[in-house]
Amino acid sequence: MCLATPMRIEQLLEGGRAVVSQGNVKVEVSVSLLQNPKLGDHVIVHAGFAIETLSLVEAEERLALFRKLAELSGETGGA
Amino acid sequence: MSGERDLASALVAEIEKTAAGIGRPVRIMEVCGTHTVELRRQGIHSLLPRGIALVSGPGCPVCVTPAGYVDNALTLAESGHAIIASFGDMLKVPGATGRTLSSLSAAGRARLVYSPTELIGMARAAGAPVVFLAVGFETTIPTIMSALLEAEKQEIRNLYLYTAFKTVPAALRFLLANPEHGIDGFLLPGHVSVVIGADAYEFLEGPGGRPGVITGFEALDMLLGILLVLRQIGRGTHRVENAYPRAVRPGGNSLARQMIETMLEPTDETWRGLGVIPGAALGLRPARADRDAAKVFSLPAAADAEAPGCICARVVAGMATPPQCPLFGARCTPDDPVGPCMVSSEGTCAAYFRYGDGT
């Protein structure tokens, strides 16, 4: 029930709504729970609502962390 | 850059090393039903060393809603006083007599919605009271409150909520106060945390606390969450870590939180399996009593009752696993479920049945 999908804002509509997409899927959702939704933002969609904007900076840092882990693990012969 | 498989192997190697350092069996509870499903669907169980048990927690909203709630909704739908609207899972849960709300859908008395936004059009067209089964945790609650605000704005007066909202921090406090389940640490729910924020779990750092790591839902996110919990167990710390910072802010989603705080208030309600947990449910504030289906339609308190032989109550409390139930996989399957843990797509029994228990 707390399943939510990352999607991208393609178009902002009237009345706090927006068209969002993931791959070939395009749907209309409410963005009324977001402070300042912008075109191109990546958002998390749950039950027809965007509930948060994803931070690209944090997403990059996550990948950097994983790369570091993989290197460390390689050095100690773990993986 | 390394592929996802290599990164997963690296994380598993770190998990093995850390688990070996701890040198005793460890129980980690995934609080959230979506984690229960994703951990099993993505086969994370099978990657973990022996001695690390992932225990499903109470985070499946349908599973912790008492049976009497379904009976009240059935009675209301059959009385003809209101049309029941609900997310899908709740329509399939058998009440005390074994009947489900979905048996009333052909007659149009129980209707499925995918998003609370659909309630506006439904209520406008219905010409009769529409009662939404407002079941969910903090992720879902603001979406329902937002739809209610929109109904008020559009002066739609025939939409009511039958609330069975539950809150995660209160359930965690309850589990901490009852340590017999032997939980060593928590994978904290990613999308509930999007709304309530990482700071909402500060109490885990106090006396009697446990390590808690806010965790996302991709395979690498979940492996990282498990690794960080294990590292804390190894060090003997109990801190709250946010391993899903791309989505979760320290203070959560302030608009959503504001909506919860202004429209709802803590109440004491029954959780299936856990009993009444003080302040662990949310109901409409008195200013919105005219939208509260329990008050408007004088519904009795929802009693807790189990189908004979069903151990769902112990499963949601982390005290039993599905294979320990004599009904599991035989009398009780997703096609013909006995209890809510098998009905809900996020139920522990349904996840074990579909994806195996990883042993």
Image (cartoon, rainbow, N blue to C red):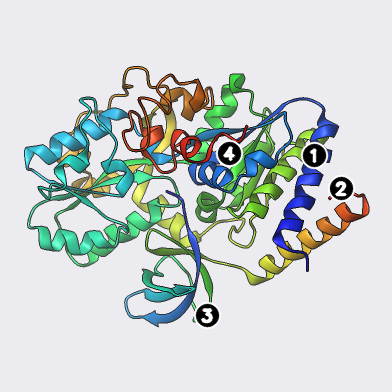
Asked if the residues shown at circle 3 and circle 4 are in contact, with their CB atoms under 8 angstroms apart, the answer is no
- Mark 3 and mark 4, same subunit? no
Look at mark 4 in the image and give the residue it sits on.
Answer: B30
Secondary-structure class at tag 4: strand
Mark 1 residue type: Glu
Which chain does tag 2 point to?
A: A
Asked if the residues shown at circle 2 and circle 1 are in contact, with their CB atoms under 8 angstroms apart, the answer is yes
Which chain does tag 3 point to?
A: A
Residue A36 visible in rendering = no
CA distance separating discs 2 and 4? 26 Å
Front in this rendered view, residue B237 or B69: B69
Front in this rendered view, residue B33 or B355: B355
CA distance separating discs 2 and 1? 9 Å
Foreground: disc 2 or disc 4: 2
- Mark 1 and mark 4, same subunit? yes
Look at mark 2 in the image and give the residue it sits on.
Answer: A78
Which chain does tag 4 point to?
A: B
Look at mark 3 in the image and give the residue it sits on.
Answer: A40
For the residue carrying disc 4, how many other residues have a C-alpha within 10 Å: few (<14), some (14-19), or many (20+)? many
Q: Position of residue B356 (x, y in %)?
A: 54, 36
For the residue carrying disc 1, how many other residues have a C-alpha within 10 Å: few (<14), some (14-19), or many (20+)? many
Mark 4 residue type: Glu
Q: Earlier in the sequence, mark 1 or mark 4?
A: 1
Foreground: disc 1 or disc 4: 1
- Mark 2 and mark 1, same subunit? no
Say whether residue B245 is left or right of residue A61.
Answer: left
Q: Position of residue B125 (x, y in %)?
A: 11, 63
- Mark 2 and mark 4, same subunit? no
Q: Position of residue B87 (x, y in %)?
A: 30, 49
Quadrant including the N terminus of chain B: bottom right
Secondary-structure class at tag 1: helix
Look at mark 1 in the image and give the residue it sits on.
Answer: B16
